[in-house]
Structure formats: C-alpha cells, structure tokens
Image (cartoon, grey):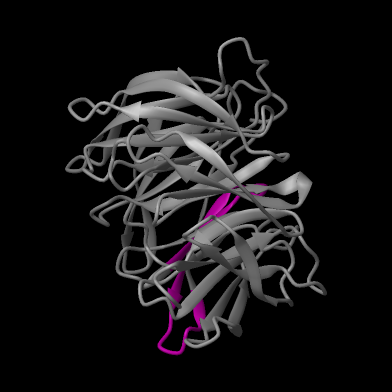
Amino acid sequence: MSNSTSLFYTGTYTGADEQGIFLCSLDLHNGRMEIVNGTDGIANSSFLTMNEAKDRLYAVSETDEGAVYAYSVDAETGELHLLDHKPTKGAAPCYISLTQDGSHVLVANYTSGHVNAYRIGAKGELEMSSLIQHTGSSINQERQEGPHPHSVFHDPEGKYVLVCDLGLDQIVFYRLEDGKLVSHHAAKTAPGAGPRHFDFHPSGQWAYGINELDDTVNVYAFDSQAGDLKILQTLSALPEGAARGSASADIHVTPCGRFLYASNRSENSIGLYHIDPSTGLLTSVEWVSTNGQTPRNFAIFKGGYVLAANQNSNTIVSFKIDKENGRLTPTGHVLEVPKPVCILPVAKCKH
C-alpha cells in the first residue's frame, strides 16, 4: 500500500449468504474510495475492531442469537479468514472492542442487556470468560424499559472497562480481573438521555459522550484514579431549531485534540465542535449534511478525512477536514456499499 492510500473495513447489515465485511481503499489525494474485497458468512456485521498488529479482526453478528467472530488478516491482500465464532448468549450485540493489552474481546448486547468478555487464545480462538447482565430501567418507557448496553471500551490507561447503557442512563465502570468483569462504579447521565457512544480526549483529562434519546453531547472530566466521570457541559447534538429525533449516533475526537464530530441520523448530519485546550469544553461550530441517509457511524482518517457510513442510502461519503478550523467539505466521492454501519480504519490516524 502506498503512502497515498489508506485501507479500511466496513461492517454492514447484510445476510450471512452475502458479502458483509468489505475491505476498501481511500485515496488520500482526493478522497476517492474503492472496494478491494469482501467476506461472507456473517450476518449483520454491525461493529468491527482490530488488534494493534493488524493481523486479527473481530466482529459482532447483530442478530437475535448474537455471535462474535474472529478472523486472521492476510498481510498481502487484507482478506479475512475465519478463526472462530462463538455465541454471545444474548441478542443484538452491537459493539465490540479489545482490552488495551489485546488479551480479551469485549461485547455489548443491546437487546438482551448484557456484556461479555472473551479470552483470546494463542491461535485466535475465543473463550467466554465473563457475562454480566445489567438490570434496571429509566424514564423513557418505550426505549428504556430495560438495560441496553450500546458500547463497551477501555479507558486510556486500560484500568477500567466502560459501558454506555442507553436503557439505564448510566456509564458503567468495571475492572477486568483474570478475565472477569468486576463491578466498580456507575456514572449517571440526565434521565432520558440514553448514552450511546463515547470517546476520550487524547490528553486523557476529558471524555465526550453522545446521547441518542435526547440528542445531546456531554463533556466529562475523567478521574482516572477513582474511575469516575463528572459532567462538565451538555450541548445539543442538533442545530438550533432542528426537530429532535432521538437519533444521535456516533462521536469522535480528532487525534490533535482540537475538534470533535458527532453524527445524527434524524438530520443526516455531522456536527463540528471546537475543544477548548485548557478546559475541554465545547463550542458548537456547524453541521454538515452527510449527503445520505442515517449516518450511524463515521471515522477519522490520516491525511485529514472523515468517512460517513450512510446506512439507509447504501453509501459511504468522504469529506476533507480543514486542518485550521476542522470544517468538513465533501470531496464529491461516494462509495456504494450495502447498508454500511461501521467504518474501521486499518492504519491509526495521525491527523
């Protein structure tokens, strides 16, 4: 791969008999994208993650009988070869990540309301080491009748596993001890917020969460010693005057720590926020159309690009980042992919 090309995998809502995980390329000169190859045999590969060596890829199968898949990655072609797949013993796993040391896979099961940890064997095989069932509810009777973990990830130091539970209005902290998830603390959001996705500032001082149900973005102070979050600020994830749609989706901070982006599926937009370098607080700047429908996920790429996955228009759209102010400009390039819902860059972004 040349320095002018970046690779990424795309997860989709497709059947097991169709190609569902696609390896794609991004031309860093102009934002043009192409499909390189595809992998079948997995239904609804709605979230993906890779290990640091980039020779293993892990995916969830977001189905009523959820599963997690492990693949080896061909170093020359990027093709995926199935190593193992195991049930999550739950429904609709929608997020997957790795612990910082790469020893365990973490999975959030939205519908059944539980979280899994899997130990990764020497040959890439998966062994479930922990299953934690969340309990409780919150004020939105339609969407918060029970627990709904929507993302699971570790803090910058790898001390804690955090779970955004949309159904409980909580960000739940665990410690992973000998493969077991051990309860530590639960940080609360506003009632009815519905925490969905989350990202840490590169400094580790602050963190940012997007709330699906009330279409807001939270700024948190992160206490790495105590394992806790304190809300510093709450802003709208939508432009002023926009109708609330309970559809805010994804959130990412640029590696430079100056800009934050948040996507919303009712407005089909990505919002830009500037980050105050001394306080971590946000200032709303603008919202840009994703030129498609239902941007469930997006990713930031080296060379200064954002790629948005428009689930219901079957497209991925590329945008150029203005390095001075973070504003997004469409490149004019669109990639047709069936129901794209996750974009996973292969190389770490250095923008």
Taking the magenta stretch, the answer to whether it contains residue 27 is no
Residue under the point 65% across and 31% down: 247
- Per the picture, the main secondary structure of the magenta-coloured stretch is strand
Left or right: where 310 falls relative to 25: right
Q: Is residue 148 above or below residue 345?
A: above
Residue under the point 17% across and 27% down: 278
The answer to whether residue 92 of the structure is visible from this angle is: no
Q: Is residue 120 above or below residue 117?
A: below
Residue most toward the front?
29
The answer to whether residue 263 of the structure is visible from this angle is: yes
Taking the magenta stretch, the answer to whether it contains residue 116 is yes
Nearest to the observer: residue 33 or residue 139 = 33
Left or right: where 11 falls relative to 217: right
Residue interval drawn in magenta: 105-127
Residue under the point 60% across and 55% down: 342
Q: Is residue 125 above or below residue 35?
A: below
Left or right: where 4 falls relative to 215: left
Nearest to the observer: residue 215 or residue 8 = 8
Give the position of the N terminus as an image quadrant. bottom left
Q: Position of residue 94 (x, y in %)?
A: 61, 53
Residue most toward the top?
241
Residue under the point 64% across and 57% down: 46
Q: Position of residue 2 (x, y in %)?
A: 43, 75
* Quadrant of res 175: bottom left
Q: Position of residue 81 (x, y in %)?
A: 60, 86
